[in-house]
Image (tube, rainbow, N blue to C red):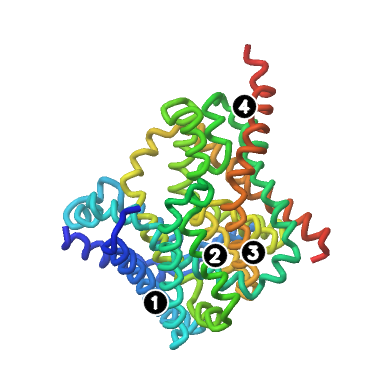
Amino acid sequence: MEKGLNQYVKYALVLLLSVGLILFTQELKVLKYPNSTPITGMTIAGLASLWLFSMIGIGISNLLSKSKISFIRNFPILGWVSITSLIMCLLFDFFVTAIQAVDFLSITTPILTFAGISVADRLVDLRKTSWKVAIVAVFVFVGTYVGSALLAQFGLMIAGK
Amino acid sequence: MKGNFILLLVYAVLVITAAEWIGFQTISIGSISITLLPLVFAILITMFLAIKVFRVGFMKKIYSKENVGFASKYLIFIMLPLMARYGADVAPQIKDILQVGWVFIIQELGNLGTVLIGLPIAVWIGLRREAIGATLGIGREGELAYISEKYTLESKEGRGILSLYIIGTLFGALFFSIFAPILLDMGLRPEALAMAAGVGSSSMMTGASSTLVARLPEMESTILSYAAASQLLTSFLGTFTMIFLAVPLQQFMYKLLVRGDR
């Protein structure tokens, strides 16, 4: 990650773009499905909280990027943001109420839009992959998901949940 | 370049509008129904329009090197609010989650399914050293780092994992968003499917958990909290599971499977 205050301004703006698009998507959802999560003052507070926790997570990750323990140094920003948010939400119920006023699926559409654009130049790489690995990939994904789901199902059964 | 960037933002807004306008679509094949969410349309539209033939005129400006570079460099930051949202889902359910904490840990072992199911298939269809890279895990950054350190990315093992990485990046979220509800229709519990969704890739987890939420809106908080907690656990334990379990298991099975070669 790059250094300096400028970089933080950039992150702040990118995050602002992200939460702005979430709000836009939620508005579209309300227009199309009037029963979906409405936009209230709480939604705005929720988006502000999401923005704030993301910034804190970036800050923690930056501070610890010089840590001597490689496990901590390499722990993903995504993880720090989740942990920050989890702790804040455990401490203050307000954050839970506010963040849950943000429609979950409205968060996902903008992200996948950028995910699609980000892989645009890698589509040509598909030619470099063999069809054999593509077949294997299906079984690899099925394997990890079914494996975990069956163990979870079994565990929950024993736990009597 | 500034102008191109504004075009990118306008394009993103238009794609989101189109995807949301298509909305939720359900396709039924026999007793299995496939739910397609707006997020699926968003990724399909952006990828489809990225094909070289369409890149003329202003589309060429939208998919300029800088814009695609911006999207891939800052994608992780655009995702951060989603990660923050998961904290709010886990917090109210934390007691529930800790109560069945051991189940969360046990299901991490399910990630060995990549080796157990993937490796025999890979060897069977004729892959050899590529199979090592292609079946160690779902081919995310952790495994990529391990393989490149041990074998380098130019090796056959490296090519195996790079291929898996590309396929996963392009189709992972899509695949899981279709596959998770199929398992639901086959009788698996939503709690178990939510836990399993924490596979270690955020977009794949989002794909799996989002369609589950769309199918069972009344269980939204349980599904999201289980998926998020499991994902967090995978980011803690994933490396250890890989090094201490997946790698030895893979070596053992690989020797067994290719024994007949010579």
Chain of the residue that carries numbered disc 2 in the rendered image: A
Residue beneath disc 1 = A23
Q: Which residue is mark 2?
A: A83
Q: Is residue B187 visible?
A: no
Report helix, strand or loop for mark 1.
helix
Q: Is residue B168 above or below residue A128?
A: below
Residue B91 appearing in the image: yes
Instruction: Pinpoint the chain carrying mark 1.
Output: A
Q: Report how far apart the C-alphas of labels 3 and 4 lie in the structure.
A: 35 Å
Which residue lies under the disc numbered 4? B124
| Tag 2 near tag 1, CB within 8 Å | no
Alpha-carbon distance for marks 1 and 3?
25 Å
Q: Amino acid at mark 1?
A: Leu
Tag 3, which secondary structure?
helix
Callout 3 amino acid: Tyr
In the rendering, which numbered label is found on residue B226?
3
